[in-house]
Structures are given as structure tokens and as C-alpha cells.
Image: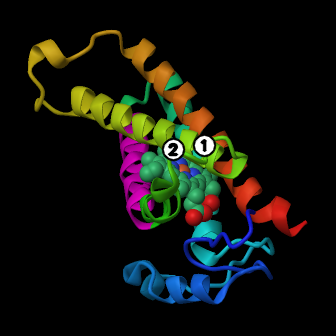
Amino acid sequence: MPEGMKTTFGQKSSRDTKHDRATLRNGNPFVTLLFPVKGFLGTGAPFAADFNLVMQLIMGAALIAGVVFAKHKCYRAHGICQTTVLLVNLLMIGLVMWPSFHQQLRPTLPKVLHRLYYALATIHALAGITAEAVGLYIVMVAGTNLLPQWLCFTHWKRWMRAEAVLWSIVLVGGVGTYYVWYVAPFA
Ligand code: HEM
């Protein structure tokens, strides 16, 4: 972790500064109220990041279960499973990842993109926004009549496979971000 860099919800680096701690206390009040500061996975991560990591892995497993439903032609269960993951993920983006992106990455872009710490998380965030948007689009086409005909696709498999690949890349990028932010600097 770069010197003086703070995590969104906590800071365990011995290098943290008075300013960082003050910023932390004045950070996103909603998240501060909702989550304790200390993480539970024994890394340098705060609670929100540990919670997000565990939720993302569970959601990854749920998406795989959803694919199995589709393969067995249980399309209703498939739809419910994938839509639930999309909506829960929207919550995790709103609660954890968007505030973190907004506080830590946006102010520093684009001048620090050459540093792995920022670059990986930024690529992850942009791919994540795309994955979530494409997922919501698929749900709207598949499960509602809200979109006009010309906006609807018919190549179901192609869209869903592309989304599965994109989501997997984002998940791996998220785990990579966790490693670069909270594991490597404390090892
Ligand atoms: C397909 C959707 C997504 C998946 C599967 C995903 C997965 C993950 C995972 C596993 C982590 C590591 C846990 C953590 O450090 O909190 C993470 C962290 C992060 N993600 Fe995502 N993510 C997704 C979407 C997004 C979006 C849309 C954004 C941008 C708004 C974003 C920005 C971030 C940031 C900034 C972090 C570091 C958070 C922190 O620790 O403070 N992610 N993500």
C-alpha cells in the first residue's frame, strides 16, 4: 500500500497519518454506522472489505448454481437465482464498492493509473459497472416487457455466456484488488 494511503473503512498500516485517521472518522457516515471497523479474515482489511469479499464469493457460487439450473432446464429457478445475485450485488456496490471507488480512486485518476494499487481497482471498477449494467439489461429483456422490441436481443446464450465470462473476470479482479490492498502490504 502506498505511503499514507488509507482504506475506506479502516487503516491498519503503521504508516497511517493523523490526517488519514481524521478523514476516516469523517468518512461515509452510513457505512461507518453500519459496519464495525475491524475485519474478521485476519488480513489488513476492514470489516466492510472482508464482508464484501465473502459475499462476492457466495454470489459467485450462486451464479454457478444458476447455470446448473439452466442446464437442467429449470429456467424459473435460473432466473430467480441470477436476478437475486444481481440485486444483492447492486446493494454491495452501493454500500461498499462505490463509496470506496468514490473516496479513494476517483480523486487520484488518471495520474496514478500506472500504479498497480490504483490501476487494478480502477479496471475492476469499470468492468464491474459494465457487468452489473449488462446483467440488469439481460434481466429486463428476459423477465420484463419494459424495453421496446428493437432493444431486445434474441441470442440468449451468447449474451448470458458473455455476461458469465465478464462477471468471472470482475470477480477475479476484485479478489486481486483485495490481495493488493489488504494482504500483500501486511505480509
Ligand atoms: C460484477 C460485479 C462485481 C464483483 C463480482 C465485484 C467483486 C469484488 C471483490 C471480490 C472485491 C474484494 C473485496 C473488497 O476489497 O471489498 C471487490 C472490491 C472492490 N470493488 Fe468490486 N465487484 C463488482 C463490481 C464493482 C463496481 C461496479 C465497482 C465500482 C463502482 C467496484 C469497485 C470496487 C472497489 C473500489 C473495491 C475495493 C473496496 C475496498 O476494499 O475498499 N466493484 N469487488
The reply to whether dot 2 and dot 1 touch (C-beta < 8 Å) is yes
Residue position marked by numbered label 2 in the rendering? 110
Amino acid marked by disc 2 = Pro
Residue ID for mark 1? 113
Vertical order, 110 against 76 (above or below) = below
Q: Which residues are magenta?
A: 76-95
Residue 52, image x and y in percent? 57, 63
Q: Nearer the viewer, residue 56 or 15?
A: 15
Q: Quadrant of residue 16?
A: bottom right
Q: Residues within 10 Å of mark 2 (few under 14, many from 20)?
A: few
Secondary structure, magenta segment, majority class: helix
Q: Is residue 133 left or right of residue 24?
A: left
Q: Residues within 10 Å of mark 1 (few under 14, many from 20)?
A: some
Q: Residue furthest top?
A: 155
Using the rendered image of the protein, determine whether residue 79 is visible from the camera's viewpoint: yes
Tell me the SS state at disc 1. Answer: loop
